[in-house]
Image (tube, helix red, strand yellow):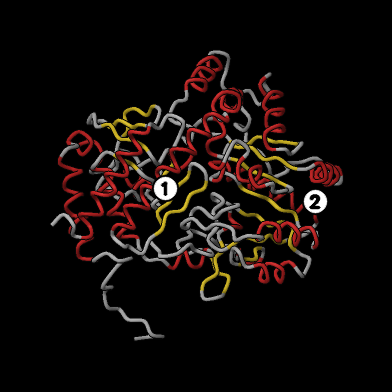
Amino acid sequence: MLDGKTNDPPTSIAGVDPERIRHFTLRESERFAAVRPRNRAMAADGLEGLHGGVPMHWMRDWPMPFPLLVDRAEGASLTDVDGHAVADFCLGDTGAMFGHAPPPVVRAVQAQAARGLTTMLPSPDAAVVGALLRERFGLPRWQIATTATDANRFALRVARAVTGRPKILVFNGCYHGTVDETFVRLIDGRPLHRPGLLGQFVDLTAGTRVVEFNDIPALEAALAAGDVACVITEPVLTNCAMVLPEPGFHAALRDLTRRHGTLLLIDETHTISTGPGGYTRMHGLEPDILVVGKPIAGGVPAAVWGFTDAVGDGLDRARAALPPGHSGMGTTLSANPLSLAAMRACLESVMTEAAYAHMEALAETLQRGLARVIAARALPWHVVRVGARVEVVCAPRPLRNGGEAEALDVHALERALHLGLLNQGFLITPFHNMLLVCPATEPAQVAGLIAAFDAVLDALTGADA
């Protein structure tokens, strides 16, 4: 024993017997493989020529015994190479938040493909997209990137240039793509590199401060030195188990950043699920910089970042003071005509008020149904929702910060839940118990998912014995 901890196996994982979880996972893995002979033949030993047998190494992080090969994705469904249709509540971890292959985006992509894919020059769609972004999100000046990671990286570079300050501040457990400076965590009260970070040769803690979400005194203390260029935050923590802001937190965040001359960057890449203008518009937040990634072009790789006139003027002054040269911002494929055409179609015809109303209503039904199933078994879990984004958190009460979220040791339970649901025809996000509803999601799919969740919990808690 050390500091009250033991190496003994847990007697319960969030109220569920670990041995039962293990047996359930083994059974469901065999069931998954048995009905997918073609998938197994193609992927069980890895896809030829690809390191780890997958195009990106994290595709091995799904709970199934071998990767699921998708033959077709349309609306709110996937079909694998063995012909099994699956109701998709993962939706590309938000990348396909408005459904797979939205018809307006498909038409726009097909039309633009015949006119050229990339030119390194603006297309006529650029002016329309700029006006749409200004109207929807409220900030006057915009730039286009290929991913939210790029947009966040460029925006942080601008924040440092405009303020002349070296440091940024993040909240523990945050997610901002693969931006180096954001891979800092609080571990035992100390800022350290995020566990698992590969090949890091620069001390990220030298340029990044990290405090817990919802901790206003810690935030104030971290900003007091006057050397923080920018606070970058999601309005709701979403990638460590969902953590909502406490009442007054965002008002205090905006007041403190202004008081200390620090810019505020809000990353809406996941919380765009809240409504047409994201969490920012819904709750009247006032960022200096706003980033939206993954779904903004209906699944075509693209991201946007907007900023105030003051930030834009500061950027112009900073560039004018330097000799000509590479700014460190931009990639050749950014703002290509194909992505702009897709983005215009998505903003005009897919990300509509009516689409969000449909998503909101079904997500509320899903939240209530899942909560009802959990309560029937008196499990110490809760369900949280941000618009069309729903998450089952295997903890008895709402989480206050990233530290509490990352302390949850429920990975084995989550993997069992995901695999069990998949075998019943429902796909959810592999990295947490996160579910998304899209405009193409049907009430019958939501009802089916609730019933499948009920059946999986029966198996995990022994009610089916």
- Residue depicted at 24% across the width and 29% down the height: 83
Helix, strand or loop at mark 2:
helix
> Where is residue 414, by image quadrant?
bottom left
Residue 29 percent across, percent down from the top left: 20, 49
Residue 165 percent across, percent down from the top left: 77, 59
Number of numbered discs:
2
Could you say which is closer to the camera, residue 362 or residue 6?
A: 362
- Tell me the residue that label 2 is attached to: 162
Q: Alpha-carbon neighbours of circle 1 within 10 Å: few (<14), some, or many (≥20)?
A: many
Q: What type is the residue that disc 2 sits on?
A: Val
Q: How far apart are marks 2 and 1 (CA)?
A: 43 Å
State the quadrant of the C terminus: bottom left
> Where is residue 5, by image quadrant?
bottom left
Q: Alpha-carbon neighbours of circle 2 within 10 Å: few (<14), some, or many (≥20)?
A: many
Nearer the camera: disc 2 or disc 1: 1
- Residue depicted at 48% across the width and 36% down the height: 359
Mark earlier in primary sequence (2, 1): 2
Numbered circle sitting on residue 367? 1
Q: Does 30 sit above or below residue 20?
A: above
Tell me whether the residue at label 2 lies in contact with that at label 1, contact meaning CB atoms closer than 8 angstroms: no
- Residue depicted at 52% across the width and 47% down the height: 386
Q: What type is the residue that disc 1 sits on?
A: Gln
- Residue depicted at 67% across the width and 63% down the height: 207
